[in-house]
Amino acid sequence: MKWTWVLALLACAVLALAGTVPGEQPSGTTGHLAPAAAPSAAAKIDSGDTAWLLTSSALVLLMTAPGLALFYGGMVRQKNALATIMQSFIILALISVQWVLWGYSLAFGPDKGGIVGGLDWFGLRGVGLQPNPDYAATVPHQAYMVFQLMFAVITPALITGTFAERMKFSTFIVFTLAWATLIYDPLAHWVWGTGGWLKRVGALDFAGGTVVHISSGVSALAAALVIGRRRGYGREPMPPHNLPLTVTGAALLWFGWFGFNAGSALSAGALATSAFVVTNTATAA
């Protein structure tokens, strides 16, 4: 068991580093790739950008609840369907509170050695309705915070599929809060936060390839290795109880992904259009 944990942690470290791509900033891009604005630049709210970011935030929320909830809920046995569906909703509630209290500050707050943000923004102190040019110069800081919240919500929700039907509720609560605080928030700061060490060396992550997908995928693998198979696996049938429910969830995920990727442009312009087209084409393929 000890070797399983060691291998899982090593895999997490290797894949996290492999998923970041050093390179130059593409000209004309915004979103997570945007460099910090010059201190003298006047930050001004753009109503169109704000509307797009808030709409995208709602679309990403739709991916978790009900999208991911229905997707996973339809694939488990009927006796565990409600518990599996509720895990996504509980994560939505838990991380929403955690993010407002300390999560956003750890991920995007003033840098502490390139590893994590400080607690200067605890409880959203200093995160107001004026833009923060370090992250998004044309939308209220709270709008950017809400958009990032939806990323923080869906990431641990993605992991729940790997321990479906075999984790106690109390353990699930502790795992979710600990994982968000100790894994997601520091990793988000490394890649996206001002002063993050991976961002400083040129790592590019436009819409969560590293922060969301690699972190949740490797964590899910580690959880599966540690928890093991379901009781009766291979000896008794365990068919999904409602595939139409899963298809409905998949459709909502497809729809919400436009906000996930195109919303990361932080404005409804050419870059968002490109991300929208690529998202739909890649999903269809």
Image: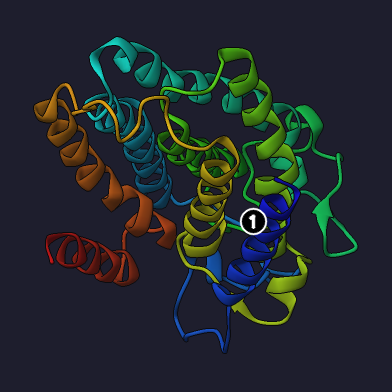
The image quadrant of residue 171 is top right
Q: Position of residue 161 (x, y in %)?
A: 40, 36
Closer to us: 142 or 115: 115
- Mark 1, secondary structure of its residue: helix
In the rendered structure, which amino acid carries the disc numbered 1? Ala
Q: Position of residue 129 (x, y in %)?
A: 62, 37
Q: Position of residue 208 (x, y in %)?
A: 49, 59
The C terminus, quarter of image: bottom left
Q: Is residue 164 left or right of residue 73?
A: right
From what the image shows, is residue 7 above or below residue 162?
A: below
Q: Is residue 272 left or right of residue 217?
A: left
Q: Is residue 61 left or right of residue 144?
A: left
Residue 42 visible here: no
- Residue sitting at the far left: 244
Closer to us: 97 or 84: 84
Closer to us: 197 or 79: 79
For the point 31% across and 64% down, the residue is 272
Q: Which residue is mark 1?
A: 8
